[in-house]
Amino acid sequence: MKRIACLALVALVCLSAPLAVFAQKPFRIAVYVPGVTAGSPLYEQMVAGTERAVKEFPHASMKVIEAGFNQGEWQEKMTSLAATGEYELIVTSNPAMPFITAEVAKSFPKQKFLHLDAYFAPGNPQIYSMLYNQVEQAYFMGYLGGLVTISSMPGANKELKAGMVVAQEYPALTKMMKPGYEQGLKAVNPNITVDYRVIGNWYDANKAADLANSMIDAGVDVILTIAGGANQGVIKAAKQKGKYVLFFDSNEYKIAPGTIIGCAVLNQEKAAYERVKLAIQGKLEWGKAEIVHARDGYVDFADDDPLYLNNVPADVRRKMAEVVKKIRTGELVLPVPQL
Ligand code: RBF
């Protein structure tokens, strides 16, 4: 009996050994950050979500490559990365990356690319992309900004002026975020105007602070900032002058409680986790271009944070909640335009 058990054990080991080797074929992932991770909410989420997926698979590993702020070098850096042939998957994020990977993919037909926060026309078997409905995301901020600028909150004035500071202009910004913000503001009061300023890069917090200061001096009392690391300058200026900031992409009330009074979030951490996991499992649908909305749970307004509940008056929150509910349930649909 003992001998049979022993033989069975040997047979089991012999049979499963090749399987174990097969199961452990490495799945290496490069996370290509077009910029730097720290201070860029969506890049931080992409790295965190990928990390979470990788931890679940002993044969998976990841490396983060920061391509820096010189956008002229991005294509060459992506080409070098694909040329190593070392990575089963390259994960990246931002709406400009499809223009780069479209070229790189042609030279390296075996390389797979997972795009977050971007649209890549469907049908390319090397590419998966996921675009967020940022009309909805920005509408949340516009509606709240409108309610704040007409409110009796201590930093609000009589002028109907809201601000928007951006790092750079690109189609997702000019076709989704800017119009979404304006639509939200005007839904509160059609006479609200937008003071809109462009910094010119994603890191110059001093320039962002200068812009915010001049806007505030001109009567702006609430500012939406979409500027990566440069957001800090807007927050600093608003805090010093007792004005308000609307924060984009992540829940970051804690950076400046009482100054940041609204966060419109993208659940990119979840998106990265889920899609990278599918890629590791060989289940990601290559060639697919997904567009996700608030009703899918990837675009949202952070209304359950104590720093929102404690710093925004109940009447503002009540009106905000009505609109948030309509967008979350799909009762109010804000279509994504052709980019
Ligand atoms: N967002 C950041 O937070 N940091 C960046 O360094 C950054 N660089 C970008 C560069 C380009 C060319 C483009 C098109 C977008 C960039 N974004 C960056 C913006 C980001 O992808 C997203 O659009 C905004 O964060 C709004 O959700």
Image: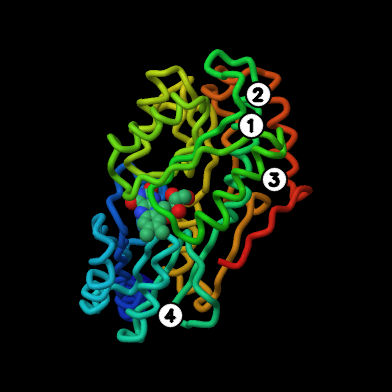
Please report contact status of discs 4 and 3: CB closer than 8 Å, yes or no. Answer: no
Label 3 amino acid?
Arg
**Res 15 → quadrant:** bottom left
| CA gap, disc 1 and disc 3 | 19 Å
Please report contact status of discs 1 and 3: CB closer than 8 Å, yes or no. Answer: no
Badge 3 element: helix
Circle 4 packing at 10 Å, graded few (<14), some (14-19), many (20+), is many
Circle 3 packing at 10 Å, graded few (<14), some (14-19), many (20+), is some
**Visible residue check, residue 48:** no
Can you give x and y, in whole percent of width and height, for residue 95 in the image? 45, 62
* Residue hosting label 3: 328
The C terminus appears in which quarter of the rendering?
bottom right
Of the image marks 4 and 3, the number of the one nearer the N terminus: 4
**Res 70 → quadrant:** bottom left
Circle 2 packing at 10 Å, graded few (<14), some (14-19), many (20+), is some
Of the image marks 4 and 1, the number of the one nearer the N terminus: 4
Label 2 amino acid?
Ile
Name the residue at 27% across, 51% down: 36
